[in-house]
Image (tube, grey):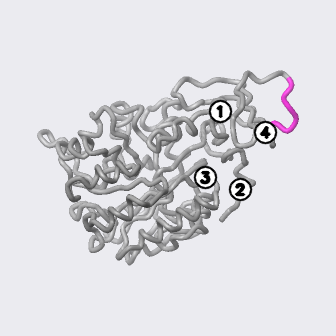
Amino acid sequence: MTHRYVHAETLYDGSGAPARHDCLVEVTGDRITAVTRAPTRLPSGTARVAIAAPGFIDLQINGAADVQFNDDPSPVAIARIAHGARAGGAAHVLPTFITADGNGWHQALRAARDALNAHSPGVLGLHLEGPFLSPRRPGIHPAQAIRPLAEADLALLETAQIPLLLTLAPEEQPPGAIRRLASAGITVFAGHTAASAAQIDAAVAEGLRGVTHLWNAMPAPQGRAPGVVGRTLTHPTLFAGIIADGHHVDPLNLMLAARMMPNRLCLVTDAMRTYAGQVTEFDLMGTPVALRDGRLTGPDGTLAGAHLGLDTALRLMVRSAGVPVEQAVAMASATPARVLRLEGELGRIAPGYRASLTHLNTDLHAIGGLVDGIPFEDLPTG
């Protein structure tokens, strides 16, 4: 069984505790077996890094490395996206399939199942963002393909048999649908929604677990209508993903979210094929999208995903929103692990946990890591 050692000048263990220094992480096979003060003489072959953090987890990534999951819902595309995500420090991902005409999401389910069966490195399941959204809040999603859940959809989702995060508009769904999905083990998030705070509370009672890209594709809170944003900020249990790229959410709103829900906020990228790739323009299901000054938009200026890695999101939270590094690290690792009910497996650097680490330099740029004990550079590129 392979033994590896990582010497971290600074270590954030994912608990939200302040950094520890001069630490040695021992890895045996795919597990962390010890975290100790580094000895004067390090074991032969020890990897030295400035900062070690738990492996980052991206719950929402549509594409990377010149691949878009909607264009190629296959295990090969998933592997390529996971490879691209590692450029920003993501050890694990949920490839994300967004609204499309017909039943393209069926193929996405099959592709994710095949990738998991093949043990594709870093792949944790699937995120379906639509088509069960609100026609009032489509964003860049093709409005003509948006629809409520039908009985056939529910039956297929209930038997998906893979880890699945489903984004939907709760106010558009048939009564009892969220309860059925949650009972089947599906993680249900609200997104692209115009739900009221009362409708969010009703959905939580049925099993709603969180909110997708907080502040985006949902109404802004009003004095007498707090809506999705107001209820998410104040709810005791709801998680939320947030896109910290300097374009989707103002830094003051990032700061507000971080202060209101420090243990319930997840950094996500919403990345598209341009991230860690060469293309700067592409077609998104009939809508031309272009990358200009770090911003992806359609012809009318609508944001079309993001050109973002998790390490960039981490830096923005720290430098623009005033979030302590240890808290921002947890937002990229421990909190998404909790969303997926993997808090006993991922999101911590501690004995017994899976040996997934993200390595950073002193400027918080990703420089490598491990996925279940295997260095990023030794993993397949897709």
Magenta part of the protein: which range?
Answer: 41-46
Mark 4 or mark 2, which has the lower sequence index?
Answer: 4
Quickly name the residue at label 1: 352
For the residues marked 4 and 1, what is the alpha-carbon distance in whole angstroms? 15 Å
Residue 319 versus residue 110 in the image, above or below: above
Q: Position of residue 151 (x, y in %)?
A: 28, 65
Give the SS element for disc 4: strand
Residue 73 versus residue 234 in the image, above or below: below
Mark 2 or mark 3, which has the lower sequence index?
Answer: 3
Q: Are marks 4 and 2 in contact (CB under 8 Å)?
A: no
Quickly name the residue at label 4: 4
Q: Is residue 6 magenta?
A: no
* Foreground residue among 150 and 340: 150
Quickly name the residue at label 3: 122
Quickly name the residue at label 2: 379
Asked whether, in this view, residue 361 is left or right of residue 94, the answer is right
Q: Are marks 2 and 3 in contact (CB under 8 Å)?
A: yes
The majority secondary structure of the magenta stretch comes to loop
> Which quarter shows the C terminus?
bottom right
Mark 3 or mark 1, which has the lower sequence index?
Answer: 3
Disc nearest the viewer among 4 and 1:
1
